[in-house]
Amino acid sequence: MAAIEMKHIVKKYGDGFPAVNDVSIDVKDGEFMILVGPSGCGKSTLLRMIVGLEDITSGDMVVGGDRVNDKAPRERNLAMVFQNYALYPHLTVYENIAFPLRLSKQFSEKEIDEKVRQASELLELDEHLERRPANLSGGQRQRVAMGRAIVRQAEAFLFDEPLSNLDAKLRGQMRTEISRLQRRLGITTVYVTHDQTEAMTLGDRVAVLKRGILQQLATPRELYEHPNNLFVAGFIGSPPMNFLPATVEGETVSLPFGKVSIPPEKARLAQGKGLLIAGIRPEHFDDAAVVEPHRLEHGSTFRAKVDVTEWLGNEAYAYIPIDLPAEIQGQLTDLERELDMEALRPQLVVSLDAASRIGEGEEAEIFVDARKMHLFDPESQENLT
Ligand code: ATP
């Protein structure tokens, strides 16, 4: 097992904009690192540079303390687990796992047998050793692919969107399985996905990329609670954070639906900044009628007409249209384009407590928790709070 250090990595294809632009990420020994971002952000290119399938334009790639920029993929001893698992259909599970050992010609039959049995026990495949891949479930196939990596004692696992072809239910199961195995094996893992649920549930830390640039590298909780900028704030969380035009005077934030008092330490950071973007997650609103009194103290309430409600069994959302002056709406639309995202809509998404009885078309008192509000600078897009 080994740590992987990416130091100021740049990748240019031709003369264009760099696909990966000065990215530095340190993956600790045994850590589960996620690379996440929208299509084209450079996450697969970065993974391919780690494993050696792509040249590095500049920067250092260090695996287990060794600079590997000029090493061939097979000299790096990293195991890429592909989306289609790349198993040999005509070989049994046993032979599939034994394959890399036979290929290396370094081991006796007895040693191979020991290693395969050890790995298959660890992966709970010992009862399926004589089956062929066609007769295995998706999860079992994934484990065979990991078994191959384990027997050759790879320094790290690298996954490129391994679950993207599966249906939602199987994806959920496989996610749990990969997480369980990675923790049991304690093997350094770098995992590429565009799915934020995978990013949030699997990663010890998550690197969020946009257009080749690292936006934030943090634990899932930090990303969710303290996003560095508008992009991360809008990308992490579902339904996404609400963004609203805001101005701050003293300790009062003026929002399209009214004024909200914010804690002085937050207010101080936003003084004299002109128009800002307030970011509030759906769960930091609620139906004021069911909010506990002690929570009400930490926010404000406003009246609003609920357009649509969505009841999902364990949660419910209310959609509240917001009227914005045309000029501000125009500014928000420009920002939305710049951010490649759809989060800036002229409507609020409010998460409702199960006890709420607000119906569609009704006017209701809505609570907003002022402590949880973020304030972003629309120019730099950074989170000021
Ligand atoms: P996706 O999720 O769609 O796979 P990604 O985040 O993995 O996207 P990359 O595949 O790493 O993104 O691509 C990053 C950028 O580099 C994209 O703009 C892409 O068009 C470009 N790119 C990737 N491979 C090549 C190549 N071989 N030649 C030229 N440009 C490339």
Image (cartoon, helix red, strand yellow):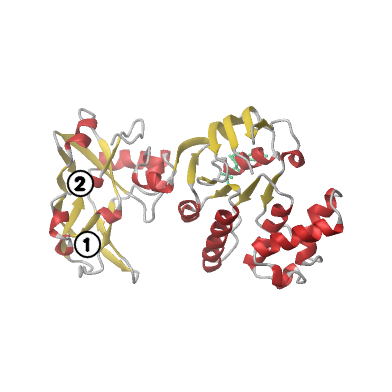
What secondary structure is found at the residue carrying circle 2?
A: helix
Residue found 76% across the figure and 42% down from its top = 74
Residue found 42% across the figure and 38% down from its top = 338
Question: In the image, what residue type sits under mark 1?
Answer: Val
Disc number placed over residue 306 in the picture, else none = 1
Relative placement, left or right, of 151 versus 332 is right
Disc number lying in front (2 or 1):
2
Eyeballing the image, is 116 above or below 20? Answer: below
Task: Give the image location of residue 247, x and y in percent.
Answer: 20, 36
Q: Is residue 1 visible?
A: yes
Foreground of the two, 167 or 104 = 104
Quadrant of ligand 1 in image: top right
The residue at label 2 has a CB less than 8 Å from ligand 1: no
What secondary structure is found at the residue carrying circle 1?
A: loop
Task: Give the image location of residue 58, x and y in percent.
Answer: 63, 26
Residue found 36% across the figure and 49% down from its top = 343
Task: Give the image location of residue 165, x and y in percent.
Answer: 60, 61
Eyeballing the image, is 18 above or below 315? Answer: above
Circle 2 sits on which residue?
A: 370
Task: Give the image location of residue 222, x and y in percent.
Answer: 38, 44
Foreground of the two, 283 or 18 = 283
Question: In the image, what residue type sits under mark 2?
Answer: Ala
Residue found 70% across the figure and 72% down from its top = 127
Foreground of the two, 256 or 290 = 290
Q: Is residue 302 visible?
A: no
Which quadrant is home to the C terminus?
top left
Disc 2 crowd, CA 10 A, few/some/many (<14, 14-19, 20+): many
Disc 1 crowd, CA 10 A, few/some/many (<14, 14-19, 20+): many
Distance of label 2 from label 1 (alpha carbons): 21 Å
Eyeballing the image, is 301 above or below 168? Answer: above
